[in-house]
Amino acid sequence: MSSLIPQTRPTPTEIIQRVSHIRRAFSQAAAVPITARQKATTRDPGVKGPYWVSRIAYPAPPEKSIQEVLLDAIAELGDGTENFDVPEVGGLEAQWIGWRSDVGKDDPEAGGSERERYEGLMKEVESDITILYVYGGAFMVNGPHSCRATCGTLARLTGGRCYTVRYRLAPQHPFPAALLDIFHAYLTLISPPPDSFHAPIAPSSIVFAGDSSGACLLLSLVQVLLSFTRSHPRTPSPTILFHGSPTPLPLPAGLALTSPGLDQTMALPSWTTNAATDIFADQLPAITRDFPPCASWPSHPPRAHPYAEALTLLHPLASPCVSTGWKGAPHMWIAMGGGERLADAAKVVARDARKDGATVQWVEFESMPHQWVLMFKDWWQGREATKMWAEACRDLVARGKELESRGCIMGVDGREREVDVMTLADLTKEDVMGAMRAKAEGMKIWTGARAASKGAKSQL
């Protein structure tokens, strides 16, 4: 790959060459059986370098309150045709991540107990910012270690701390299990369970940050919180029980998201028009005829998509681009690559949230593919986006009420031009749902490589 790494200001041709190379490598990796990929990508290689990492495990709360809130939101936002298994609220593996100064990139992890490492992390924290970071991985792969470097960098640039959890993965744990885990994670920040290392954290100091499918989960969580507030119109600050304590469900200071994946059907126009500039193949590998089966896929009983039943992908908590309302949503900062196949879905969310009164700051990097912020750190686009990401986290906490909506496109040449967030997308809600429904209805139940299959409509 080194022969394809260009100078720090790549030309359009160099971008296409590098993206093509990554697409081939990505397709090869994605063709590995899901169970094998999960084993490889969830294994923590250990901590080294300039990072504080403190691990803590939380038991499941004795109440079912968060499960009930989630189910109520699914019912309110859906059309009643959703088909899913109800996940239980489980225990939670969490990690605090911070920047560890004056440490070399190959130095070993700090010694001491997990609590002592947390105390060491806090000695280097310089601001009130707490970032709840949710990593991507198509809902199927990766673990807390996969975002360690990103969290460490954001902690260094913001002076804050990051918090991430291991969430349940599909296809073994389909929608809405991962969302329930992220909801659980948020509550552990604002209402710490017994024996937590941290004190309760003010929601006004918390930023939801994430990439790809992780960003999707965070936007879905915002929809859950908004739904809960709507369901208690006469109660100023409604609460639920969490580990025996009455706990309100306030919104965070805001969201800072990169490359959010918000259409699980992959049906909107940019999926086709940006095919040459993104890292994705035309189809999700796991639903192609030649994909190798394993212990976890096909599912039992079989379904059309690893994350959810085909038509359940149309639910706003699975694909937030079909959400019908963002009134009351917190501030949003969204960074998207202009070459991403999922760009239209993110543009729809940004536009709709702005129309509903949310403050939305949109930054688009011309010709960049999915996850360029994490993959192209040697290019100016990756470095600049990372700086802007950290600045957004700082502003959401320090300047929330002062922030104004704005949009910009960063050209390949480094020049910036403004764009109106309200006109980012020309797709109507009917256009979006129509395209996605047609795609979902055409999905086939996946029963194994080269196996006969049935239409997704038979799932309901």
Image (cartoon, helix red, strand yellow):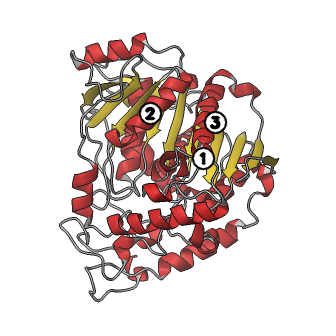
Q: Which residue is mark 1?
A: 8
- Mark 1 surroundings within 10 Å by alpha-carbon count, few (fewer than 14), some (14 through 19), many (20 or more): some
Which structural element holds mark 1? loop
Asked if residue 62 is positioned above or below residue 20 in the image, the reply reads: above
- Residue 171: tell me if it is visible: yes
Which structural element holds mark 3? helix
- Residue 226: tell me if it is visible: no
Res 453 → quadrant: bottom left
Q: Which labelled disc corresponds to residue 151?
A: 2
Q: Earlier in the sequence, mark 2 or mark 3?
A: 2
Q: Nearer the viewer, mark 2 or mark 1?
A: 1
Q: Which labelled disc corresponds to residue 388?
A: 3
Q: Amino acid at mark 2?
A: Cys
Kindly indicate whether the residue at mark 1 contacts the one at mark 2 (C-beta within 8 angstroms).
no
Of 260 and 36, which appears nearest the observer?
A: 36
The residue drawn where x is 56% and y is 59% is 369
Q: Which labelled disc corresponds to residue 363?
A: none
Q: Position of residue 47 (x, y in %)?
A: 28, 31
Asked if residue 7 is positioned above or below residue 443 in the image, the reply reads: above
